[in-house]
Image (cartoon, rainbow, N blue to C red):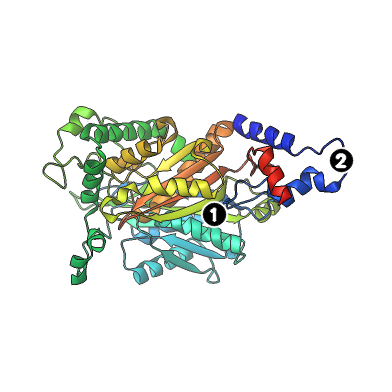
Amino acid sequence: MERALDRQRVLLRHLQPSPSSGSPSHTPQSACVSASACAAGDLAAYQRTASFGDDVVIVAAYRTAICKSRRGGFKDTLPEDLLAPVLRAVVEKTNLNPAEVGDIVVGTVLAPGSQRGIECRMAAFYAGFPETVPLRTVNRQCSSGLQAVADVAASIKAGFYDIGIGAGLESMTVDQVRAVPKVNPRVHSFAQARDCLLPMGITSENVAQRFGVTRQEQDQAAVESHRRAYAATQSGKFKDEIIPVSTKFVDPKTGEEKPVTISVDDGIRPNTNINDLAKLKPAFRKDGATTAGNASQVSDGAGAVLLMKRSVAVQKGLPILGVFRSFAAVGVDPAVMGIGPAVAIPAAVKSAGLTLDDIDLLEINEAFASQYVYCCKKLGLDPEKVNVNGGALALGHPLGATGARCVATLLNEMKRQGRDSRFGVISMCIGSGMGAAAVFERGDCADELCNARPIKINNLLSRDAQ
């Protein structure tokens, strides 16, 4: 917050009119207009205007608990029954008329597209949406949930509609990761095309080997993820974001079916320690360092994010949880696809007119400890700012849902931290060699200079002269 105030004071000093000049062209207001001095940088995705009414804001973000696939709390829950509760929650908790939603976009990965699209449409009906509200799915692998949020934000910004929902869904109990059934023989002539087919665990080993990430560093990252996730659970931090799901659970031993309500992540292992992790065998290469203990868990879960134009949120009297500021998707070498966040985060931050020093919190998906450790080291990130409540190594990684889950986790944590946390980033690596990242601003701290940053007076004068 102090940094923000300093930026405002510096900018205001630069833009004060000269005492000897009465010309309107030298007023602070016209200086901002003529020289874009109040923009957040030449390449900024957003600029200061007289009104922030067309900002895209998040007014609600919720998720289910994340459960271990095939043996956790959602092993007997159909995908559409995971999605429906969070779709219902974002509407009911804001008292929004569901008919006002312009579109629902759901990130989802493993199921055949047409089948999952139908299941998601069914989920919307279960959640109480009328037939007039359309829905589609989107698949950008592990960033699908974040891509769904970005797609909705872009549509609102473009004026296609004023209110939309970006969601994510994955039941890795129902739909498993499988190899491509029929491979085009041309891949043998294109190394990068061939590398798109590498198992994700092998890409993790490639990152560790190429960039010198040790087994101990990976195991330590896993220990810390479980420690933080357990602490967050015990302190009740996740209660603000998790929607309890009433479902059924079939006892694998007796076959008895009983009703249950799932409201706690069940993959967290509070007793995880370095000594136990060191005993695990490598999962992908005999001489490798990636194990079941330092890779993300295979999981089931869903999340949903309600976005709208700021002016609409203000009109409805809805509290603003966050502001969507920028999004970037980038391509990287498929053989080391895990490095994606190290490239995507700087791109998204620059697009928002910020620097990494401006970012107070980050949620970087822990697909594998190797790539998570590498990205943090490459960007020089403060460990106390990244995944403060644990990540996928402890919570799990339901592929299509992770992005939406991260939005709920990040924005709720920024709200808790208040003045100590203004800008946050969400990022993840993407299978076949990509990375995605988005920048969010805490919702209750926007002001008339919220897009401003300090500038040199010489730059301002030279721009005016042009």
Is 132 in front, or is 157? Answer: 157
Left or right of 268, for residue 284: left
Left or right of 446, for residue 435: left
Q: Which residue is mark 2?
A: 21
Q: Secondary structure at mark 2?
A: loop
User: What x and y, as percent, mark residue 418?
Assistant: 57, 33
Is 259 in front, or is 370? Answer: 370
User: What x and y, as percent, mark residue 31?
Assistant: 75, 46
Pointers 2 and 1 in contact (CB under 8 A)? no
Q: Is residue 448 in view?
A: no
User: What x and y, as percent, mark residue 135?
Assistant: 48, 67
Three-letter code for the amino acid on which mark 1 is drawn: Leu
Q: Earlier in the sequence, mark 2 or mark 1?
A: 2
User: What x and y, as percent, mark residue 138?
Assistant: 41, 63
Q: Which residue is mark 1?
A: 306
Q: Is residue 218 in view?
A: yes
Residue at the spot x=21%, y=45% of the render? 205
How far is mark 2 from mark 1, CA to CA?
49 Å
Residue at the spot x=19%, y=50% of the render? 254
Q: Is residue 49 above or below residue 270?
A: below
Is 408 in front, or is 371? Answer: 371
Residue at the spot x=53%, y=46% of the render? 440
* 10 Å crowding of disc 1: few (<14), some (14-19), many (20+): many
